[in-house]
Amino acid sequence: MSIQIGITDDLDTCFDLRRIVFIDEQNVPTEEEIDEYDKTAIHLLAQDESGPLGTARIVIDGETAKIGRVCVLATARGQRLGIGLIRKALQIACDLDGVKQAKLGAQVHAIGFYEALGFAVIGPVYLDAGIDHRDMVQPVQ
C-alpha cells in the first residue's frame, strides 16, 4: 500500500473524514467541528489507492503554526498515518517564513503519541468539545 500525504484543496473530503471521526465517533457537535479557520488553513490529506484515510490542518497565528483536526479513519489506524500527518505538518511549518513553533491541543489520551513526536505539554487540562485536552508545543527550525 502506497500512502501519500500532501496539501489539498479538497475540503469536502477533509470535512467528510472529520465528520466520521469527530462528529460520528467522538460526538463532537457539528457547529464546533467546522469553523472559520477552515477558510484560511492549510489542509492535509492522507490517502492511498483505496481513497482518503486521514486529514489535518494548519492554522498560522503569527509565529505559531497551530496543528489541529488530526484524524485517521478507524479502518486505517495503526498504520502510522497520524505520525505521517504530524511530520508533514511540521515540515510545512518549518518552510513557512516567521514560524517559530508548532502548537496543538492534544486529547489527553493522545499526549504520549505527541510527546514521541517531540511535543511538550504546556498549561492545564481544558475541555474542548467536551473532551479533555492539553496544549503542546514544539519549536520548528
Image (tube, helix red, strand yellow):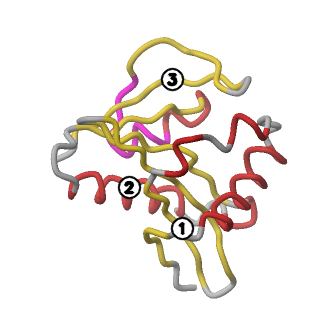
Tell me residue 17's x, y (percent). Answer: 70, 60
* Residue position for label 3: 134
Q: Is residue 132 magenta?
A: no
- Residue type at mark 3 is Arg
Q: Closer to the camera: disc 3 or disc 1?
A: 1
Q: Closer to the camera: disc 3 or disc 2?
A: 2
Q: Toward the viewer: 110 or 68?
A: 68
Q: Which mark is residue 45?
A: 1
* Residue position for label 2: 89
Residues drawn in magenta: 113-121
Tell me residue 86's x, y (percent). Answer: 43, 53
Q: Toward the viewer: 116 or 39?
A: 39
- Residue type at mark 1 is Leu
- What residue sits 63% from the left and 88% below the top? 49
Which element type, helix, strand or loop, lies under badge 2?
helix
Label 1, residues with CA under 10 Å away: few <14, some 14-19, many ≥20: many
Q: Is residue 49 above or below residue 141?
A: below
- What residue sits 40% from the left and 43% below the top? 116
Tell me residue 38's x, y (percent). Answer: 55, 49
Tell me residue 119's x, y (percent). Answer: 35, 36
Of callouts 3 and 1, the N-terminal one: 1
61 displayed left or right of 34: left
CA distance for labels 3 and 1: 24 Å
Which element type, helix, strand or loop, lies under badge 1?
strand
Q: Is residue 115 magenta?
A: yes
